[in-house]
Amino acid sequence: MEVSTSPPSSDKNKSGNLFDSSSSSSSSSSSLLSISSKFSVATASFMLLLLFLFTLLSTRWSDISTLATNYSAQFTFSMFSKNTTNYPHRDSYLLNCTASNMTLTCPANYPPPTTLSNSNDTCPEYFRWIHEDLKTWKEHGITRDMVESLKEDAHFRVIIVNGTAYVKQYHKAFQTRDVYTLWGILQLLNLYPGRLPDLDLMFQCHDQASIKRDNYKGDAAASAPPQFHYCADDSTFDIVFPDWSFWGWPEINIKPWVPLVKDLEDGNTMKNWTSREEFAFWKGNLHTGARKRLSECNSIENWGAQIIQQNWAKEAREGFRNSDLSKQCVHRYKIYMEGNAWSVSEKYILACDSMTLLVNPIYYDFFTRTLIPMKHYWPVNPNNLCKSIKFAVNWGNNNTDKAEEIGRAGSEYIFNQIKIEHVYDYMFHVLNEYAKLLRYKPTVVEGAEELCSERFACSPMGLESKYKAETIVSEPSERGPCTLPTPYDPDTLRDLRDRNVKIMEVVDMWERGSS
C-alpha cells in the first residue's frame, strides 16, 4: 500500500473523549475518565485477573512471567531506541499503571524543570519558517479573545501552566489524530521539562487549513485567529505543527517514526536503483481532490505509470499486513499528489531513494518549504499530468545517474533533517515563539483536564498501546533544543521563491520541447 492519504472519511466532528481509546473506532461519547473513576479497586483488580487468566490460556507458560511484568508497579519505556547516548539517563519518568491507579490520575513525581541552555547546534533551515508563520501577530500580539474565537472549529485546546499541560476537547478528531498529537506534546514536555513558558492554543485536526487570509486583509490580518494545524498554504494563516503519525498511526498499522526510519533505510537496500521497476508508481485513495485525474495516467505503456486504487476495506480486514512501507521502495519513481490537502505520505515517499515525482503541491507542512525542485524531487505539471509524468520517467531512464541522485537527495533530506530530535525541537521552538506573542496570562479554563502519560498509555490495548510504549520519552534530555536560526529577510524569501519558480519553468520548457 502506498499511504497517499488518510483512509476515506467524512472528516466530520465526532463526539467522544480523548482519553477513550475506543473513540478511534466508534462514535461513543462516553469518557474513559468518568467511567474509570467509578471503578473500585476491587473491580479493577478483578478485571485484571480475568485478563491474566485469558492470557494464561492463550500464551505459552514460559511467557507468563513476561506478561506479568507488564502489570508490575512501575515500568519505563525508552523513546530513542539505539540512540540512548544522545539522551543519557537522568531522573526517569516512571509510568504508574497499577491496579490501584485505574482511575488514571496524574502523578506528582515528575523530574524538576531543567535550566539547560540551547544546544550549540543550529536547527535545520526549515525552522526559519517559524518566524514567517507567526509574523502576522508579531507587532500587536495575540489576545485571549482571538484564541477563544476558535472554539467552534477547533478540536482541542492546550494550556500549559507552570510546566503542566491541560486539555479541553471541543470535538473528536478523525481516528486518533488528536490523541497522538497530544501524546507528542506530552513527550516534548518530558524531554524538556519546565522549559516552555505558559501558553494557550487551539488545534484543528481536519485535512485542510481553514484560517483564510481573504477574511483578514490589510490591518485586519493582525486580528486573525492563531490556529495550529498540520498544514497550511499561501491563502491561509494556519500555524503548521508536526503531524500525529510521527508517534504512529495504529489504524493503518504505520509504525512510529524512529523504528519506521530504520525499516525504510533497510528497505532501500533491497533493490539497487538501476534494478528497480522502470516506471512510476502510486497507490492510495483516488476519490479525493485532484487525485481523481490521476487514474487517467494508469498505463505503463502509454504514460510510464502504474496507478492503483487502495482497497481500504480489504486492507482493514487483513490488518494492513500487506502495507509494509519498507517493502514498497522497489520503483525508480514514486508519485506524490495531494488529495483533499497535504498528506502524511509525502515523507514516506521521499524516503524511498526513488526519484519523487511531486505533482505541484498547494499545501506545505513544517519541513517541506525548503525542498528544492530538481535537487530533492522532480516537479510534475498538474495541468498536463499524464504527459508530465511520462516525460519525467523517460528523462530518468535516459539519465539514470541524475535521476538516482535526485532520489537519494530526497531520502537524505528526510533521514538527516527530519530526525525525531528535530521534530521535538521544532515543536519546542514554534510553541516557545508563539507563547512570546500572548498578551494575557494563560489560566486553566473550566472543563480542562490535566494531561499526563498515564492517561494515554495505561488504558489502550493493541497497536495503540505498543506505539505509545515505543515512543514515550523516559527521561529528560541533557542538552537543550537546537538554536533557532534567524528569520528570513524579504529579499532572501523572494529569491527562494523565484529560484523554485525558475527551475520549474525550465522543466516545463523541456516538456514542451519534447512534444
Image: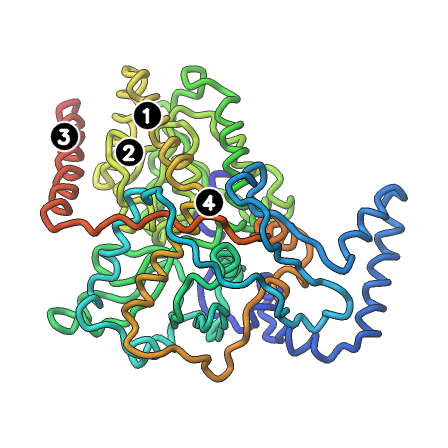
Give the spatial CA distance, label 1 vs label 2: 9 Å
Q: Point out the tag, 1 or 4, that comes first from the N-terminus.
A: 1
- What is the distance, in whole Å, between disc 4 and disc 2 at their CAs? 36 Å
| Residue plotted at (16% across, 43% down) | 497
Q: Element under label 2? A: helix
Dots 1 and 2: beta carbons under 8 Å? yes
- Give the x, y percent position of residue 473: 56, 52
For marks 3 and 1, the one nearer the N-term is 1
The residue that disc 4 covers is 420
Q: Amino acid at mark 4?
A: Ile
Nearer to us of marks 4 and 2 is 4
Question: In the rendered image, which residue does mark 1 sit on?
Answer: 302
Q: Is residue 250 above or below residue 271?
A: below
Q: Which residue is mark 2?
A: 386
Residue 354 screen position, x and y as percent: 39, 27
Residue at 42 percent across and 48 percent down: it is: 423
Residue 228: x and y in percent read: 35, 63
Q: Residue extending furthest bottom?
A: 446
Eye-nearest disc, 4 or 3 = 4
Q: Quadrant of residue 137?
A: bottom left
Crowding near the residue tagged with mark 1, few <14, some 14–19, many ≥20 C-alpha atoms within 10 Å:
few
Q: Is residue 266 positioned above or below 222 on the image?
A: above
Total numbered circles: 4
Is residue 174 visible in the rendered image? The answer is: no
